[in-house]
Image: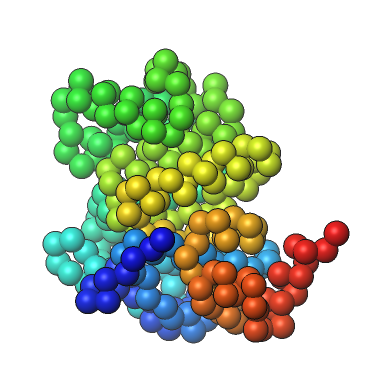
Amino acid sequence: MMTIDINAAPLLSVQNLGKDYGNLVACTDVSFDLWPGEVLGIVGESGSGKTTLLNCLSAQLAPSRGAVIYDTRVDGPRDILEMTESERRLLMRTDWGLVRQNPRDGLRLGVSAGANVGERLMAVGARHYGDIRAEAANWLQKVEIDVGRIDNVPSTFSGGMQQRLQIARNLVTEPRLVFMDEPTGGLDVSVQARLLDLLRGLVTRLGLSAIIVTHDLAVARLLAHRLMVMRHGRVVEQGLTDQVLDDPQHPYTQLLVSSILQP
């Protein structure tokens, strides 16, 4: 059960965010606050704007308008769009994580599993080889990868193992905010279930805040405290996950929910 400190500042505050491609509006007028320890799910069909929104929030894509205010550890709330490129890169290496749908996009395939995890530690100043290797081994265990595979390259791993390795690579520096883009997409159902259990446990134990983009409402129900439903680039409904899924108010949300209940 999530506990929110009502006296705490939002970890992330999004204000009137929008992204255009010429005359095409990919997303527009998106505003919300994300609180420490909260998991927000963003759902909608393909083309709804959810991935574009995630890319803007995580500084992978420059929005056309709006603000993304992050409560940094040192300087307090800052608009990430006004940071320098080096400041944003540092944020992504330290306080943020990004779990991509295709784990191969989030891993260095030419180096070992241990090096994939250890590189992120080195990016925040770790230099002692023994300590780095020990922490990498510790994280492989946390994501249920045999420590004996620490020197194997990711191309020898299954898709589910690669995704778990990507999660370890992102979480080893104890980020406060993790962005996840369809983290279970493309995996077999049994592998999805195991990965979801792992993710739910890690998010709870580490007190992570997370923003998860998914088309799978079952994934959203399992992981997200709160839900935003997008259609044609706009948020059409948002609220507590169970409320949105059990009593949808917007016709589009009703259609989404009814589609998964069809025999």
Q: At x 20% / y 25%, what residue is drawn? A: 131
Residue toward you, 220 or 187:
220
Residue 186, can we see it?
A: yes
Q: At x 26% / y 24%, what residue is drawn? A: 134
Residue toward you, 78 or 218:
218
Task: For the C terminus, give its image quadrant.
Answer: bottom right
**Quarter holding residue 222:** bottom right
**Quarter holding residue 3:** bottom left
Task: For the N terminus, give its image quadrant.
Answer: bottom left
Q: Position of residue 26 (x, y in %)?
A: 58, 74
Q: Position of residue 123 (x, y in %)?
A: 24, 40
Q: At x 68% / y 41%, what residue is drawn? A: 189
Left or right of 82 on screen, residue 199: right
Q: Is residue 132 above or below residue 198?
A: above
Q: Is residue 148 above or below residue 157?
A: above
Q: At x 37% / y 75%, what residue is drawn? A: 33
